[in-house]
Image: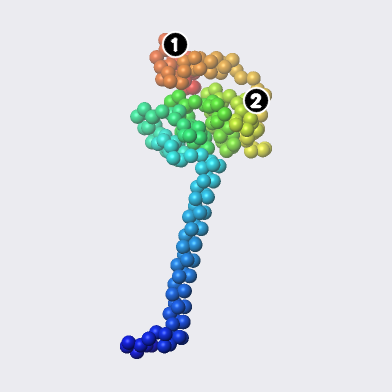
Amino acid sequence: MFKSGGNMTANPFALLHYSNVYLTILALFCFKLFIKIKEAARISAEFCDYGQGHRSWADRSPLHDAACQGRLLALRNLILQGHNVNVVTIDHVSPLHEACLGDHVACARTLIAAGANVSRYMVSPLHAAAEKDCTAIVKLLLDFGADIHARNIEFQRPVEVAPPSSLTEGFLLVYEATPQPLSQLCRQRIRDRVGRDRFHLINHLPLPNPLRNYLQYRW
């Protein structure tokens, strides 16, 4: 220790001791700063990779969130409030896509009944369901007129994106090779002419109840 009024240079060992303390503190600070920079870079890289490899989350609607999480009651309430079931993100992801990716059959059916587009160009819900091996949703989409021969951005058909030897792949192969009933083709044609925005008016058409139910998939 130094006496009062003493000169620090009079004791070189003390000066060296204090220098080592300061250097240790500086090294520790630099190390922590380096760790924080690396962590920030890692998070940034993961965020960018997710945005490029998956889809944008910045412009998702409440319908997207409800469909993704399988919250059927919330989804129905949002539809009743007038939310657009065909709203898409910048990556062309619709609420129906989210329901397909999450294998939420009830949510998918609710969206379709509300007029969701089952055959979006290039980014098809059928491709999403086939890729996730969601056979029940694949069947649902096909029943409602999804194009089994649609091509995605990679020019692949739904059967080509389904997991090899999966139940969905087998179902799609059989479906492709099986002619569709005339009644189903007629139903799809009538619904196309009516238009998705007017499906709710089918119940008011001057038709027998069994026919109205058939057009609305109420077997």
Q: Position of residue 164 (x, y in %)?
A: 67, 38
Q: How is the structure coloured here? A: rainbow
Residue that appears at 64% across and 38% down: 163
Which element is circle 2 on? helix
The residue sitting at 55% across, 30% down in the picture is 124
Q: In this orientation, does residue 170 appear?
A: yes
Residue 197: percent from left, percent from top: 43, 20
Across and down, in percent, residue 205 comes to 42, 12
Mark carried by residue 57: none
Residue position for label 2: 176
Q: Nearer the viewer, residue 36 or 164?
A: 36
Q: Is residue 115 above or below residue 33?
A: above
Cα–Cα span, label 2 and label 1: 32 Å
SS of the residue under disc 1: loop
Report whether 209 appears left or right of 174.
left
Circle 1 residue: 207
**185 and 68: which is toward the camera:** 68
Looking at the image, the residue that sits furthest to the bottom is: 3
x, y (%) of residue 100? 52, 35
At a point 63% along the width and 35% down the height, the residue shown is 161
The answer to which image quadrant residue 111 occupies is: top left
Eye-nearest disc, 2 or 1: 2
